[in-house]
Image (cartoon, coloured by chain):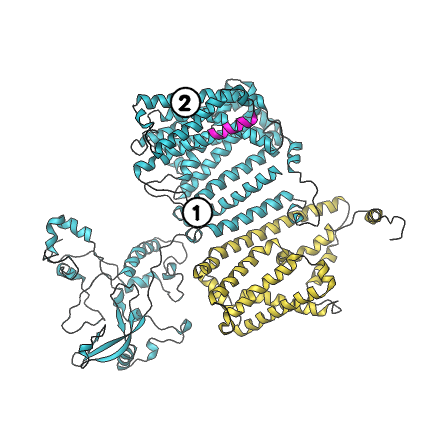
């Protein structure tokens, strides 16, 4: 078990980091190139890009709560807690920083362990809440793909195992086994980051740009749809 | 779809090679290869250089056929042959760069001329020929760029370069054989021959014809285009004649040299010889003599494959495999070596396909065929495929994902030493353990003696107590640490618990013993029995140390070091010896030996102004122990470098 743990924390972690770094570089390059092509296309069609609106929309999308409280205020709140815990805990946990200092010789300020504990619990609870809301709402369920459930559960795993590892009295399993699951799931998240919807950590700022210039219906698209549906003469 | 599959495989292996090459550049060649002193030429040189050069021989063979002999029939293949040569020789140069220990010295043959070295000649030939190939292939690039003026200029002088290229190839193809004339006793007699240079040259021509055949067939198959059979049939004919000449020469040479006796001895080497000869010459000659096989693409493909495999086996045999029986070396290429070889070849293959797609390499393959081969048909826009095959940049999307996946996978597969660099194995140490012992106080001498293990007979005069037994390297030379007594003694000196227990240190750690007992680090010599034996004249003088020949030769029955080397004894030591006991110093053990070994060089490098960060600090080696800090300068103060053993009054 110790051997596996060593392997997961060593070469496998390096591999996950390499995949993360290269994968992110790949995403940035591909999306940059696609953006250039799409901008060129937009210009050659004689259209202009409303940059102001794009910028405005980007900031609007970044707000944790929509102006009116949103259609699903609970979902917004849980999502905020979830994202806070997700960002802060792994990066500023004292134990992680000690590992980083040993391995790479770099370290930074750490969270107070009590705060980290509460953040972890908050993340677990909010992740469960998000899962519940996703399953509970028929509308959400209809547009959910398998990866939406899988990624949520995958993200939950290192938080649960990490909490259990830090609180041995609560942990029904062997410490090394818990740690192994913790490290493996963490590595998997790092590796999957550039290839799943998790890539929004890097692509969030350009998402609105793509929406603005990439998603236009063709001219007369509505008539085509009506034709396909056999409702040509009905009012749209 | 088959093109896409092949390209993804090539990108995958390119990712493998990319990582290993990067790690090899960071950590040195020893961290990735399985080579040893008996077999210093492994997969990279034997397979990647010696075998790839004749495969690239297609370039000069076809150049000679088309531009010197004016056999116009082969013109459609000439440019592809030059490109194949360019790819093979580039792979050779790149592979060689990573095979030499200090890789950036690959340019040294340009500046330091070693006229007596065969490798010097090969290095220059390959360098020049690579330049010539690049020049020859520049036609295609200039044509594509439509730089007609320069193209005309290049075409005017190109015949000079073509002849130069043929001359250079003749030189280095044969001198690769010359290289192995230097190893008459390493190489198995079935391969060693004074004719090696000639054999290497002839086979390069024969193999050149068949490799360009193979590459043409495969490229046309990939793009779904009908193969140009007329030139291929002609090449097959030439190859069978050249390989026939080779077979006659090789077997004739072996017969004349009286080595025919080896032919049928049951031995792995002989089996290897026959397999090699069968694949590289006999089978191709037999099958290519039939017209129907010469005109069938399938048959040609398999015959060419057999010849390439067989002839590569021939080069690998000469470069290493056939030396194993003479040198008794064992060598199995490591994964990393395979990854680098595959990676470089895959990258070369990708560049080749890139040229085929964008330049006019084959007159039969152009824009329409390339587009057709890349066509994926209609894709469901909602399916997962769109993540990777969405336009624009459908190819880049998919291949880059394959590349990244390969990088991750290879990092997981490689051993620790390749990823993090080779480091000395840490010695397993034992932590202190609590033991029960007897204490014997001698108030007059202010000395305490411990009896361990307990001797029940001495019950009255002694006092039972517990202490920590410290014997980290488990060599039986332990120290007993009695906490209470340490406290008492410190108190006598007016010091407090804080002398050892600093609450300010990380994890509230106690000071280590060496903080006070500096002389733990005093160096002494390790006893080298062999050196003593030699200087005393071997077996005759055993009684010098083992004084009583009737007794078993153990440490207890032998003269102590200090009898001859009194200077070894430490005088100002804090470690007390019991009354009536003498201070006898033995080798201090692994730790000091390792310190002496590493610190000397580290110190020298720091004095020479090494720019490596932290090279002169203890943490350069003790990476996993955050509490070990300080610089080597300090270590040196604690432990002065050992001086050569002085002999006072003894034999040398």
- Residue B81, can we see it? no
Q: Is residue B611 magenta?
A: no
Q: Which residue is mark 2?
A: B246
Pointer 2 or 1: first along the chain: 1
Secondary structure of the residue carrying tag 2 is helix
Which of the pair B29/B36 is nearer the observer? Answer: B36
Which of the pair B600/A183 is nearer the observer? Answer: A183
Mark 1: few, some, or many residues within 10 Å (few <14, many ≥20)? many
Q: Which residue is mark 1?
A: B24
**Residues in magenta?**
B295-307
Corner quadrant of residue B475: bottom left
Is the magenta region chiefly helix, strand or loop?
helix
Residue B261 lies left or right of residue A77; in this view the side is: left
Chain B visual colour:
cyan
Residue A67 lies left or right of residue B113; in this view the side is: right
Q: Where in the figure is residue B214, as x and y percent of width and height?
A: 53, 29
- Chain on which label 1 sits: B
């Amino acid at each position: 078990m110790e051997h596996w743990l060593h392997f997961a924390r060593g070469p496998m972690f390096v591999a996950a980091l390499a995949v993360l770094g290269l994968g992110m570089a790949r995403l940035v390059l591909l999306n940059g190139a696609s953006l250039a092509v799409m901008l060129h296309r937009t210009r050659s069609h004689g259209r202009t890009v409303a940059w102001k609106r794009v910028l405005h929309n980007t900031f609007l999308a970044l707000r944790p709560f929509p102006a009116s409280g949103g259609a699903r205020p609970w979902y917004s709140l849980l999502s905020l807690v979830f994202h806070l815990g997700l960002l802060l805990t792994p990066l500023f946990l004292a134990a992680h920083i000690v590992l980083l200092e040993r391995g790479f010789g770099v370290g930074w300020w750490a969270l107070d362990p009590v705060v980290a504990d509460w953040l972890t619990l908050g993340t677990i609870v909010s992740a469960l809440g998000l899962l519940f809301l996703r399953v509970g709402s028929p509308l959400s369920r209809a547009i959910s793909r398998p990866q939406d459930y899988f990624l949520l559960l995958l993200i939950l795993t290192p938080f649960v195992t990490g909490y259990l590892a830090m609180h041995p009295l609560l942990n029904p399993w062997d410490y090394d086994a818990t740690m192994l699951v913790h490290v493996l799931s963490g590595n998997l998240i790092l590796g999957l980051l550039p290839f799943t919807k998790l890539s929004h950590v890097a692509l969030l700022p350009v998402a609105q740009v793509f929406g603005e210039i990439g998603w236009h219906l063709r001219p007369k698209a509505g008539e085509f749809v009506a034709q396909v549906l056999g409702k040509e003469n009905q009012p749209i | 779809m088959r093109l896409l599959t092949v390209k993804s495989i090539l990108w995958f292996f390119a990712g493998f090679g990319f990582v290993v090459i990067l790690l090899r550049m960071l950590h040195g060649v020893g961290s990735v290869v399985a080579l040893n002193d008996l077999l210093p030429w492994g997969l990279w040189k034997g397979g990647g250089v010696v075998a790839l050069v004749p495969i690239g021989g297609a370039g000069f063979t076809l150049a000679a056929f088309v531009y010197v002999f004016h056999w116009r029939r082969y013109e459609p293949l000439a440019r592809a042959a030059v490109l194949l040569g360019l790819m093979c020789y580039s792979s050779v140069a790149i592979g060689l760069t990573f095979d030499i220990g200090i890789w950036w010295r690959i340019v040294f043959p340009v500046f330091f001329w070693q006229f007596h070295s065969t490798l010097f000649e090969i290095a220059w030939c390959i360098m020049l020929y690579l330049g010539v190939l690049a020049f020859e292939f520049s036609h295609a690039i200039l044509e594509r760029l439509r730089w007609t003026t320069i193209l005309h200029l290049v075409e005017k002088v190109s015949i000079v370069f073509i002849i130069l290229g043929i001359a250079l190839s003749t030189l280095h193809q044969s001198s690769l054989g010359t290289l192995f004339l230097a190893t008459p006793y390493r190489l198995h007699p079935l391969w060693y021959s004074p004719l090696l240079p000639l054999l290497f040259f002839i086979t390069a021509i024969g193999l050149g014809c068949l490799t360009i055949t193979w590459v043409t067939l495969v490229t046309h198959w990939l793009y779904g285009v009908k193969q140009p059979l007329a030139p291929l049939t002609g090449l097959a004919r030439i190859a069978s004649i050249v390989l026939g000449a080779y077979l006659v020469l090789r077997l004739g040479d072996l017969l004349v040299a009286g080595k025919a006796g080896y032919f049928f001895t049951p031995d792995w080497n002989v089996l290897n010889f026959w397999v090699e000869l069968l694949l590289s010459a006999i089978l191709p000659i037999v099958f290519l003599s039939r017209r129907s096989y010469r005109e069938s693409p399938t048959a040609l493909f398999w015959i060419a494959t057999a010849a390439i495999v067989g002839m590569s086996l021939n080069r690998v045999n000469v470069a290493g495999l056939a030396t194993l029986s003479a040198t008794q070396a064992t060598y199995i290429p490591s994964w990393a070596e395979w990854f680098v070889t595959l990676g470089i070849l895959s990258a070369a293959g990708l560049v080749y396909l890139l040229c085929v797609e964008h330049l006019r390499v084959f007159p039969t393959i152009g824009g329409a065929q390339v587009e057709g081969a890349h066509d994926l048909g209609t894709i469901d826009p909602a399916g997962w495929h769109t993540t990777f095959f969405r336009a624009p940049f459908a190819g880049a999307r998919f291949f880059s994902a394959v590349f990244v996946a390969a990088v991750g996978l290879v990092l997981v597969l490689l051993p620790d030493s390749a990823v993090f660099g080779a480091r000395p194995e840490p010695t397993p140490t034992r932590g202190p353990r609590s033991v029960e012992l007897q204490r014997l106080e001698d108030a007059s001498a202010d000395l305490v003696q411990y009896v361990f293990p307990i001797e029940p007979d001495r019950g009255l005069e002694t006092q039972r107590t517990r202490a920590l037994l410290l014997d980290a390297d488990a060599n039986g030379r332990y120290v007993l640490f009695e906490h209470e007594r340490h406290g008492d003694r410190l108190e006598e000196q007016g010091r407090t618990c804080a002398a050892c227990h600093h609450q300010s240190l990380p994890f509230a750690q106690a000071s280590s013993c060496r903080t006070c007992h500096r002389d733990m680090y005093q160096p002494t010599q390790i006893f080298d029995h062999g050196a003593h034996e030699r200087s005393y004249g071997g077996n005759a003088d055993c009684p010098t140390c083992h004084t009583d020949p009737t007794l078993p030769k153990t440490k207890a029955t032998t003269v102590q070091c200090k009898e001859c080397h009194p200077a070894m004894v430490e005088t100002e030591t804090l470690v007390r010896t019991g009354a009536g006991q003498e201070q006898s110093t033995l080798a201090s053990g692994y730790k000091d030996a390792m310190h002496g070994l590493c610190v000397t060089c580290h110190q020298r490098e720091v004095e020479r102004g090494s720019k490596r960060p932290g090279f002169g600090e203890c943490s350069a080696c003790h990476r996993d122990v955050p509490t070990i800090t300080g610089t080597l300068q300090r270590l040196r103060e604690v432990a002065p470098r050992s001086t050569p053993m002085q002999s006072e009054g003894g034999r040398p």
